Image: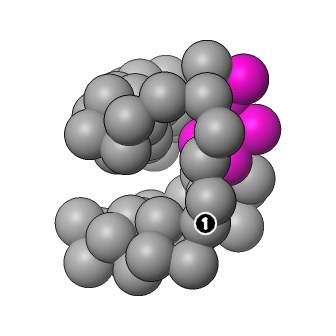
Amino acid sequence: MCNQCCHALVEKHPNATDQIIEEWFESDLCRCTGYAEIKEAVKSMLKSKDENTPG
């Protein structure tokens, strides 16, 4: 998995909801792997980012 779509989504939508994640991948064509794993990776990235953000 290249993770390009994950990083792009997190950068553009740092507070992405499940709905935003779903909409993002509706228009994305992944050639690396299945979308289920990618969606979970995005959610994990967002959670990690929130846990490491001061405030």
The quarter of the image holding the N terminus is top right
Residue 30 percent location from the top left of the image: 61, 47
Please state which of residues 51 and 25 is positioned toward the viewer in this rendering: 25
In the image, residue 23 lies at what x, y percent? 41, 80
Dividing the picture into quadrants, the one containing residue 17 is bottom left
Q: Amino acid at mark 1?
A: Asp
Q: x, y (%) of residue 9?
A: 62, 58
Q: Residue at x 33, y 70 (%)?
A: 22
Residue 47 visible to an observer of this rendering: no
Q: Residue at x 26, y 40 (%)?
A: 36
Front residue (pair 34, 17): 34
Q: Which residue is mark 1?
A: 28
Viewer-nearest residue: 5 or 53: 5
Looking at the image, which residue is at 47% across and 66% down? 25
Q: Is residue 55 left or right of residue 17?
A: right
Q: Is residue 53 magenta?
A: no
Q: Quadrant of the C terminus?
A: top left
Mostly what secondary structure, the magenta segment?
helix
Question: Considering only vertical position in the picture, is 50 above or below 20?
Answer: above
Mark yes or no: residue 5 visible.
Answer: yes
Specify the farthest residue to the front: 31
* Span of residues in magenta: 2-6
49 relative to 10, above or below:
above
Q: According to the image, what is the colour scheme of the structure?
A: one colour
Disc 1: CA contacts within 10 A as few (<14), some (14-19) or many (>=20): few
Number of numbered discs overlaid on the protein picture: 1
- Dividing the picture into quadrants, the one containing residue 32 is top right
For the residue labelled by badge 1, is the local secondary structure a helix, a strand or a loop? loop
Q: Residue at x 23, y 66 (%)?
A: 18
Q: Is residue 21 depicted above or below 4 in this figure?
A: below
